[in-house]
Image: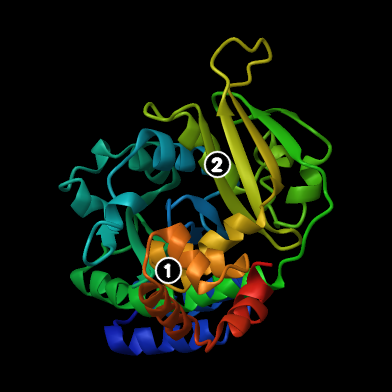
Amino acid sequence: MKRNGGDVRADRVTDAALRAARSARTVEEFFEKVKRVTRPALRFDICAGVTVDPQTLMNTGGDYRDALPPSMMPRMLDIEYREGDANDLSDLATRTTPVGLLSRETGGCLERSPRYRDIMRPLGFRDELRVLLRDRHGAWGALIMGRAQDAPPFAPSDLAVAASLAQPLGSVLRRLHLTRLAEAGASAAAPGLVLLDEEYRVVHRTPTVDMWFDDLGRPADAAAPFADERLPPAVYAVAAAVQASDAPGTHTSWMHSRTHGRVRLNAWCLGRSDTTGARTAVVVEQAGSGEHFGLIAAAYGLTPRERDVTGLVLRGHSTADIARRAGLSPHTVQDHLKSVFDKTGLHSRRELVAGVFARHYL
């Protein structure tokens, strides 16, 4: 495979990646530009740009044009959200430096990794480098990179470059999440239902499903017998999560659709009584405004108490009402509101309702 070589200092790569990221107007363009400027330094052969929910780390979409073949995606997400493996995003989220190299995480024994055994080795890849894109408000996405067997191994300098990208790119990606919410409109499409078997193949889908998924740019996989049944990665992710051994039997997540905005995904584990072979049901529908508020609050870095106070302000309650409902003094309520104003760049309750939160939430 052809690769661009040459070592580039971490600060130089970070500056170039940050300039590219800031010029992007969409999440898809963000990942496209970031991959273009980081490829010469990190010399990856495949790379997925993933968006995640900052509260759950569930997959919500991203850019998979330079990633794994679509036929491999269900198994990849099954490992990530049901089976578990080294170098998972949940592991990276607990670290001071959110970067992981699969060979290092497995102690040099890659055969211990189901992701390596079932996906990387059959496709001819030697290792996987991940960086979680996060800032002080939370995690917003990830870059997942792979090198082929004929490529040199990832070096410590590559991990240093990846680490330098985490915070600045996470901050830009957070702002793009807000931009997408501001631009999203309500959808009139009816909810859709997808039934999946234990291998995540489609057993049944209602006609309305295509109304939700047809704008997501699912890549065709001509070699796969079910190419026309490919679903967005976020659907496979929530289906895998509900099948985890410690899952309660239902799971709710979301994804972003370019046409419909934020979309809710509800999954149920059906057990083994269904004669159709279905093991998981996923319903897709428009997300409610309350779910938008949770992401907006996370993106602005509001604390749980600040979220409570802001929610009461948006519902028209006075300082005295908020103090009584929240069990706080009026002075403390005002302190929380001042912090909210500082974080959102607003100056009054009126601006809070009519400005950013009206645009994103109401």
Q: Where is residue 78 in the image (x, y as percent from the top left)?
A: 46, 37
Q: Which numbered dot is residue 306?
A: 1
Location of residue 108 with respect to 215 vertically, above or below: above
* Corner quadrant of residue 245: top left
Rendered residue at 29%/88% (across/down): 11
Q: Which numbered dot is residue 119?
A: none
Instruction: Decide: few, some or many residues near mark 2? Use Cα within 10 Å; few <14, some 14-19, many ≥20.
Output: some
Outermost residue toward the left in this view: 107
Rendered residue at 29%/57% (across/down): 92
Quarter of the image with the N terminus in it:
bottom left
- What's the CA distance linking mark 2 and mark 1? 24 Å
**Amino acid, disc 1:** Glu
Between disc 2 and disc 1, whose residue precedes?
Answer: 2
Apparent side of residue 290 relative to residue 126 in the rendered image (left or right): right
Apparent side of residue 261 relative to residue 31 in the rendered image (left or right): right
Q: Which numbered dot is residue 252?
A: 2
**Amino acid, disc 2:** Thr
Quarter of the image with the C terminus in it:
bottom right
Apparent side of residue 210 relative to residue 304 in the rendered image (left or right): right
Given this view, does label 2 or label 1 mark the residue nearer the observer?
Answer: 1
> Judging from the image, what secondary structure is the residue with disc 1 in?
helix
Location of residue 94 with respect to 71 vertically, above or below: below
Q: Where is residue 151 in the image (x, y as percent from the top left)?
A: 33, 62
Q: Position of residue 97 (x, y in %)?
A: 23, 67
Q: Where is residue 273 in the image (x, y as percent from the top left)?
A: 59, 9
Decide which of 293, 286 is in the foreground and name it. 293
Decide which of 226, 312 is in the foreground and name it. 312
